[in-house]
Image: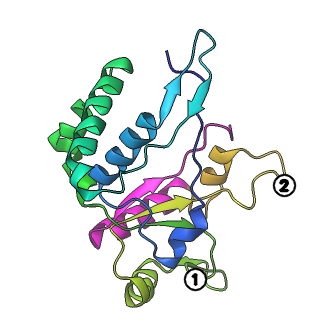
Amino acid sequence: MLTNLPIFILNHSMSVYGLNLFGRMKQLVVFMCLFFLSMSVSGQTGDIIYRLIPAPGNPGEWKAWRDSLRIERDRMRQAIQYDDRLYRDPAFAWAAECYQIYFLMLFDEAFYDRQNAQFRVEDFILETGKKFGKPDGVVLWHAYPRIGLDTRNQFDHYRDFPGGLEGLRDIVDRFHAKGIRVFIDYNPWDT
């Protein structure tokens, strides 16, 4: 059993600059497979030992090397009882085409007009579209950097949102009207 797996944290602010952090879902799956391939589980403690799997310097050996990676990937899939049903589910097929996702602070001045108490969804899409191309999705980041200044939790921040939960629904509907997927942020550590 794999234990003590490291957790990778992506810096959400990088996506504001239009970097395609996720790429295709398939690329993410390949990354995760390679990640698992790069680990070995030792003994009874479940400690992870990292090892690199460098490509051979001779291009003539690359096919055999890739074949060995596939064998190791299949072995690791069996070891972790990997099940890819959700990746094959037609209901989630859109995820493979969701290339560019922005992590959007809800109260960013480029998105929220404080003087008029309005969210600038359409303007935001136009402005970021000029710089980086139209996003395929946005993650609405609600609590940071405000959470922790008082006793409110992440759900309180959504309820205290301008317009409440209906106001949040309006923003989601406006993004959807432009063909942009919306992810509502949930942080299990901020309850």
- First in residue order: circle 2 vs circle 1: 1
Q: Amino acid at mark 1?
A: Ala
Stretch of the chain drawn in magenta: 165-191
Locate residue 54 relative to residue 143 in the image: left or right. Answer: left
- Name the colour scheme: rainbow
Whether label 2 touches label 1, CB < 8 Å: no
- Residue 77 placement: quadrant: top left
Picture quadrant of residue 79: top left
Write down the residue under mark 1.
Answer: 110
- Helix, strand or loop at label 1? It is loop
Residue 24 located left or right of residue 139: left
- Examine the rendering and report whether any part of residue 45 can be seen: yes
User: Percent x, y for residue 145?
Assistant: 73, 62
Q: Which residue is mark 2?
A: 149
Viewer-proximal residue, 77 or 166?
77
* Residue found 51% across the figure and 21% down from its top: 2
85 w.r.t. 10: above or below: above
Whether residue 47 appears in magenta in the rendering, the answer is no
Alpha carbon distance from label 2 to label 1:
23 Å
Residue 175 is a magenta residue? yes
Q: Nearer the viewer, residue 157 or 37?
A: 37
For the residue carrying disc 2, how many other residues have a C-alpha within 10 Å: few (<14), some (14-19), or many (20+)?
A: few
- Label 2 residue SS: loop
Q: Position of residue 8 (x, y in %)?
A: 57, 46
Tell me if residue 5 can be seen: no
Q: Residue at x 61, y 84 (%)?
A: 116
